[in-house]
Image (cartoon, rainbow, N blue to C red):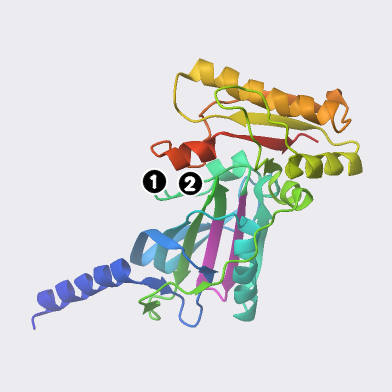
Amino acid sequence: MTPIMHKAVRSLSIVLALTLSHPVFAGLDVPYPSGVERLFTQQTENGTLRVPIGPWSQQSSVPHEKRSGTATVSTFELRATSITPAQVAAPIRQTLRDAEFQITLDCMSNECGGFDYRVNTPIVSPPNMYMNLRDFLSITGFKGSDRIINILISRIGERVYIQERRVDPSADAPVTHSKIKTIAQPTPTTNVSDQFTQTGAVTLEGLDFTSGSTNLGEGPFSILSELADYLRQNPNTKIVLVGHSDAVGGLEGNIAISKQRAEAVRQRLISKYGIQKSRITAEGIAFLSPRASNQTPEGREQNRRVEAVVLQ
């Protein structure tokens, strides 16, 4: 085989490996929840990546380190799930520690710097990666001077997106496997207090509005009782109720409807549960923040909802 043919075959082998398998550090399998699907993979031999090693600050923006070697960028998606970025990250963090990686960055959303972190950190473009500024986690670990990995996890609606950026020695190419290493999905967080702590927002599941109107049904609705208990236990907390709609009809009409439904929930919390009206506001954003496709009846049903968002 001529050198040119050998190089062509080797290049084709690399492409096939990336298409059919998930490359990992030799000796380091990154565990992801079962059901995860790869969206994108790009590998460059003798490449260089800038990897974040700390949160954003006014003094240093987002500090990065450059590492050279076999550079790999991959993204993954987990659909129809209620697990959080923190739950996805827990076994990953432990795997890095067990492999003797030094963790230099481990932060969530505002701790990372929120919007400022996003605009100063390399992110794969949609549709291969999406990032929710309210609900993401970033973790970076390195080992020696030639291995580094950053994993960014973000939740949007019922989907979790993961970006993995890493560099390993060119002389020690990543081992490839036919399947992504997965673990059983952790038990979803359903407690209102825990959800507020982790994401700052709770979807008020199970509400029933009279067909074709903005009137809230008689109930009882356990989620409202739980939300009221949380507000009583945290008397200084204020929330905004945000109404969402499907994409049937125009924007202005749906904004009005979604706000009226949020207001109906607000009035129920005030009249039935005795929550002070000054602690709750209501807004509507129509179909501008979907959590499912509006192309199916099931998706439209999921998009018609009210969320509670912590203000302070």
- Residue range in magenta is 136-152
Q: Residue at x 47, y 64 (%)?
A: 35
Q: Residue at x 86, y 33 (%)?
A: 273
Identify the residue under disc 1: 127
Q: Which mark is residue 130?
A: 2
Q: Is residue 221 left or right of residue 164?
A: right
Q: Which is more toward the observer, 157 or 25?
A: 157
Decide: is 137 above or below 204.
below
Residue 263: x and y, percent? 71, 23
Residue 197: x and y, percent? 76, 49
Furthest-left residue in view?
2
Q: Which quadrant of the figure has residue 114?
A: top right
Q: Is residue 265 visible?
A: yes
Q: Residue at x 60, y 24 (%)?
A: 258
Residue 36: x and y, percent? 46, 63
What element does badge 1 sit on?
Answer: loop
Question: Pointers 1 and 2 in contact (CB under 8 A)?
Answer: yes
What element does badge 2 sit on?
Answer: loop
Q: What distance separates the C-alpha of mark 1 from that of mark 2?
A: 7 Å
Q: Residues within 10 Å of mark 1 (few under 14, many from 20)?
A: few
Could you tell me which quadrant the N terminus lies in?
A: bottom left
Q: Amino acid at mark 1?
A: Pro
Q: Which is more toward the observer, 238 or 138?
A: 238
Could you tell me which quadrant the C terminus lies in?
A: top right
Q: Amino acid at mark 2?
A: Tyr
